Amino acid sequence: MRLPTESIMRGKLRGISALNSNPLDNGFCAVMAQNQENICSECYSRSALQRYTQNAQPKFSAIGKWFARPRTDKELNLINFSSNYVRFHAHGEPLNIDHAANFLKLAELWPNRLFALWTKRPRLVQLALVNRQKPSNLTLIYSSPKIGVIAQRPLGFDKVFTVFDYPPYNHRLNCFGKACINCLICYIPNKIRTVNELLK
């Protein structure tokens, strides 16, 4: 792959740009999906890529491999985004520290865009942040691994995203899985620290 290209998302992510990788060739994702207590066992991405979006697999695999190597600012600056809002990993997870570091650099290079990274691998991001500041236009979101259990927010992260398989009693739902572009609580810096969605 010469240069990764954005994915124009559909469904609830319509209007949001995304840079994805392939969870089907990510060892971390495979292990997480085997545990029925993990939300990964219900992974929409793995299901979609095995069924009706199989043609996206080669592209997502190539993007993951490209980002998993150190990249220069010159290389990263050639990646274009058609939306003002960019999601890192609507599909997939960072493969290594270089992958996470390249995402941090991308946000620095595009200060006029708002980025959000969802991940269950906070340690990779934390290591990538050593000796550098998190870009102010990037929201770091830790995805709670367990269904219905709001995880502790990792150091350096802005929010925790949790999926419930029943309406929570102690925490209100504030993600309704419809049109992210009309909500943006995950992209716009704010004081909301927990984002809760009902499993679809």
Image (cartoon, rainbow, N blue to C red):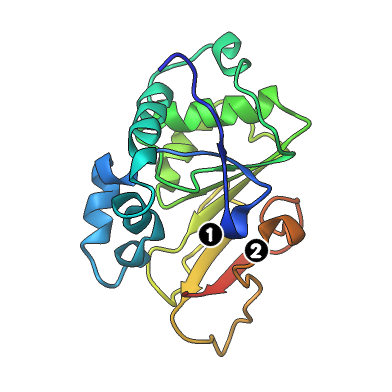
Depth order, front residue of 101/26: 26
Labels 2 & 1 near each other (Cβ < 8 A):
yes
Q: Position of residue 182 (x, y in %)?
A: 76, 60
Image quadrant where residue 83 sits: top right
Residue under the point 59% across and 9% down: 74
The type of residue carrying mark 1 is Arg
Asked if 70 appears above or below 124 in the picture, the reply is above
Residue 66 vs residue 191: left or right? left
Q: Where is residue 10 in the image (x, y as percent from the top left)?
A: 57, 52
Which residue has dot 2 on it? 193
Q: Position of residue 199 (x, y in %)?
A: 47, 75
Residue 50 vs residue 48: left or right? left
Count the labels in the image: 2
Residue 119 vs residue 55: left or right? right
**Element under label 2?**
loop
Asked if 153 appears above or below 25 in the picture, the reply is below
Cα–Cα span, label 2 and label 1: 8 Å
**Element under label 1?**
loop
Residue under the point 38% across and 19% down: 69
Asked if 83 appears above or below 182 in the picture, the reply is above
Image quadrant where residue 114 sits: top right
Residue under the point 43% across and 17% down: 70
Q: Quadrant of the N terminus?
A: top left
Which residue has dot 1 on it? 153
Residue 188 vs residue 8: left or right? right
Q: Position of residue 193 (x, y in %)?
A: 65, 63
Q: How crowded is mark 2: few (under 14 residues within 10 Å), some or many (20 or more)?
A: some
Residue 132 visible, this angle: no
